Image: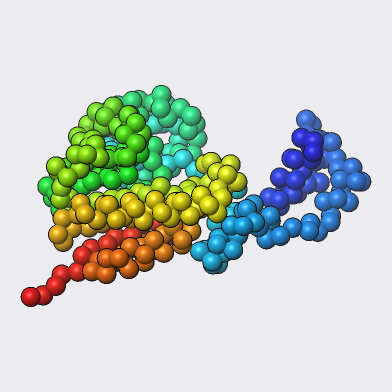
Amino acid sequence: MTGRGLMLGLCARDGADLRALWSGAGHGPSPLSAAEAAYLAQTPDMSQAEAHDIPDWLWPLWTQSLDANAAPAAQALQRRAPIFLRINTKRTTPADAVASLAQDDIDAVQHPDVSSCLEVRRNPRRIKLSQAYQSGLIELQDAASQLAVAAIPVPDQGRVLDYCAGGGGKALAFADLRKATVFAHDIAAARMADLQPRAERAGVKIAAVATKDLARFEPYDVVFCDAPCSGSGTWRRTPDAKWQLTAQMLDQYHAMQDDVLSRAVTLVKPQGSLVYATCSVLKSENSQRVAAFQAQHPDWHVVAERQLIPGPKWDGFYYCLLQKQKHNL
């Protein structure tokens, strides 16, 4: 396959006017040859999985999980991912953050559904060099994660544990949005290496906790578990990930997710909240994991649940808020 052939295929897939684009005008590519035009006129013999750029083995799970959203979600993952920022509300406002970014020639607009979120429309590569970023006014974070954190109730002066913190983005968001003491934990502590510098830049305090020390600070009012997953809601950011995923790997994720929930629930305060989240759109990693947890812990019930579909507003993301039922004496 030549570079010209690849570009023709991409343009044809996106529904572009090929004869207008490939006219030979100016510095444009030369007109379509008779052979190219004849080939493009053929109806390709592709499976639904191939047509939507999803692995064959995964397509049945994809459609079962997403139903009417299966095709739109797959198409969204073939496009460039939008860049979102979270403003640090303790330090700035959306309007002031937009103005500060503009001084570094970065265009951003406020998200229509997430008050703390900005979408970058131009010059995203300049973000980390901008004064707004360097001074802690903004953080890079997808709108879906921001929406999930904002949806979780936390009592004033409460205690929040970001149980699978990774780089600590959600811990930082909780520390900014809530009047709470925030703890961050990850089974691979090295993933949190940049958390304290980020917290200092944002002007918030987060306590990093080793696994062996979790019990010292329990119970927590909220335990937020952004569990390891396939990342299927974010594949436009890592396009090769879907081709590396196997059925065996997916089963391993299921086991890890069940283990995360079974460990995290022991840390939750009575009448506290357990939040399960993934950046996946697959039911087997989301609602089915919650159902498996409830089968083992029938006194925990779902208070709120939402599946976000990848598109222009955010990546694919799932969260479920669970609380323990009160029993009358």
Please report the residue visible at 82 percent of the width from the left and 51 percent of the height from the top: 40
Please report the residue visible at 46 percent of the width from the left and 62 percent of the height from the top: 283
Please report the residue visible at 76 percent of the width from the left and 35 percent of the height from the top: 3
Labels in figure, total? 0
- Visible residue check, residue 147: no
Identify the image's colour scheme: rainbow, by chain, secondary structure or one colour: rainbow
Q: Is residue 10 left or right of residue 178?
A: right
Please name whichever residue, 291 or 41, is drawn nearer the observer in this view of the structure.
291
- Visible residue check, residue 133: yes
| Location of residue 86 by image quarter | top left
Q: Is residue 270 left or right of residue 236?
A: left
Assign the N terminus to one quadrant of the image: top right
Coordinates of residue 280 in the picture (x, y in percent): 46, 53
Please name whichever residue, 304 or 274, is drawn nearer the observer in this view of the structure.
274
Coordinates of residue 2 in the picture (x, y in percent): 80, 36
Assign the C terminus to one quadrant of the image: bottom left
Q: Which residue is the extreme one toward the bottom?
A: 329
Please name whichever residue, 293 or 309, is drawn nearer the observer in this view of the structure.
293
Q: Which residue is the extreme one toward the left?
A: 329
Coordinates of residue 25 in the picture (x, y in percent): 81, 35
| Location of residue 274 by image quarter | bottom left
Q: Is residue 64 left or right of residue 151?
A: right
Residue 190 higher or lower than 13, as above or below: above
Please name whichever residue, 267 or 204, is drawn nearer the observer in this view of the structure.
267
